[in-house]
Image (cartoon, rainbow, N blue to C red):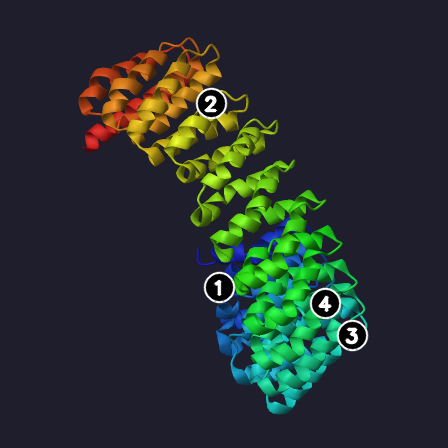
Amino acid sequence: MADEPLYPIAVLIDELKNDDIQLRLNSIRRLSTIARALGEERTRRELIPFLSENNDDDDEVLLAMAEELGVFIPYVGGVEHASVLLPPLETLCTVEETCVRDKAVESLCRIGSQMRENDLVEHFIPLVKRLAAGEWFTARVSACGLFHIAYPSAPEPSKAELRSTYSQLCQDDMPMVRRSAASNLGKFAATVEYAHLKADIMSIFDDLTQDDQDSVRLLAVEGCAALGKLLEPQDCVAHILPVIANFSQDKSWRVRYMVANQLYELCEAVGPEPTRTELVPAYVRLLRDNEAEVRIAAAGKVTKFCRILSPDLAIQHILPCVKELSSDSSQHVRSALASVIMGMAPVLGKEATIEQLLPIFLSLLKDEFPDVRLNIISKLDQVNQVIGIDLLSQSLLPAIVELAEDRHWRVRLAIIEYIPLLASQLGVGFFDDKLGALCMQWLQDKVHSIREAAANNLKRLAEEFGPEWAMQHIVPQVLDMISNPHYLYRMTVLRAISLLAPVMGAEITCSRLLPVVIAASKDRVPNIKFNVAKVLESIFPIVDQSVVEKTIRPCLVELSEDPDVDVRFFSNQALQAIDHVMMSS
């Protein structure tokens, strides 16, 4: 009997060598079970060396192994023995498949961050040096991700060597190695002392920014923001600003796109004054770039950028570009602009918004592309706080009506989502006059998702304007639709009733909504009848117990004897729910 637990372990160990990949994977994923069974010493002596030699040819198995080893410290006897995990991971850092290398680097970083300082010096730093000097480029790519773990614990001579090694990796013949060095530069720089940061790291950074490969330069742009946060403001202005100014005119649109994405973070790093003098011209250039992708990225940051500037500067420099972008030839640029432009209103203030921004809003509201109009409508509340809705309402209405009847159902669905927001901004009077009929119209849409969203919309409107308003403007029209000849529309009415009942309260539910539901239980279509059972199950907690016993239970009992199996199922489910509540109360 004592041998029994060991038998599955023996199977798992055998499976590590099996020809079937699925069995090998299963075994690798349960390495912790094997290690627990073997004990710490045998794991160190037998299992880890076996994994080091086991150069499996399947990437999936190697990926699972790299992941498992990252959390293996407890199974080898704690941090004092963590160094035994380094050899198998070192091997994995050199394989061809990128995701395996990335996972091995991640696991090495996790182990390295827990290792004792003397173990790092003895085992981890030599590992980093070996990888950095690797013959095959994959080892050198992996090495770049490990420097930030190795550097803080290294003695002074080793630190100098690590800095110089990193510098060599940044000038490697292989673009993949330079890319890896560029993307990890920020992490490494964060561990380097300030004196060396200014001297060594900035010279490395300068080399990367002048690389002939645009894929390396665009990763250097990412490094700009990270380095900018590490440097003193005056050093940041001296070293980083000129680079950004050059990058904003780079011959590769991908690099310019990256600058447009990162520019706001850089503004935070350099402070308001240099932003005004140096970065505004760069940003204006990006807003007018000849590549649509760059304009999209720049347009998406327009509100954030304006917040850093004074309103006068924003009006002088940024607004003319915004006007141009509002009539851009690319619909995606206009859409990106529409999603953020409303946020400019609080920055510019009431007067400038009415004079300068309002005409742009109105032109975007008439855009031929529905996404542009939707993006404007979705952010209405930001403008309303500044100028009030009256100035917009006349142009809003045609845009809303057009979107509400758009031939693409997803556009109709999106506008329904915004109706409660519009209702709260426009007020009850405007809503009743102009939008009430639309909300009812959606209940009879051909697309189920629209009808479902319309029913939810009515509930949210009832919450916004209150039960009395709903009783006057929503409930009668909804209940009239129960006589619609098409059963799908009658189902929508039942859905709307189940959503409205909790908002309307017990009295209105009993007097107006419940009779309609009970009458629908006599419908000839089974789908209606089992939906009646669902509605009754959802509204019985709202009403009085006497109503449940007199009206709801008899109706459900009758439905539970229906010839249709689904009707019987849902009515019995509702009866069980009622019984359960009665028993617990």
Choose between 460 and 333: the one closer to the eye. Answer: 333
Count residues near mark 1 (Cα–Cα under 10 Å), then give few for <14, some for 14-19, many for 20+: some
Q: Is residue 51 visible?
A: no
Residue at the spot of label 4: 247
Mark toward the start of the polypeptide (2 vs 4): 4
How many angstroms separate mark 1 from mark 4 (CA)?
54 Å
How many angstroms separate mark 2 from mark 4 (CA)?
53 Å
Q: Is residue 104 visible?
A: yes
Mark toward the start of the polypeptide (1 vs 3): 1
Choose between 3 and 467: the one closer to the eye. Answer: 467
Please, is residue 83 above or below residue 252 in the view? below
Count residues near mark 3 (Cα–Cα under 10 Å), then give few for <14, some for 14-19, many for 20+: some
Q: Are marks 2 and 1 in contact (CB under 8 Å)?
A: no
Residue at the spot of label 1: 36
Q: Nearer the viewer, mark 4 or mark 3?
A: 4
Choose between 108 and 392: the one closer to the eye. Answer: 392
Mark toward the start of the polypeptide (1 vs 4): 1
Point out which mark residue 172 bears: 3
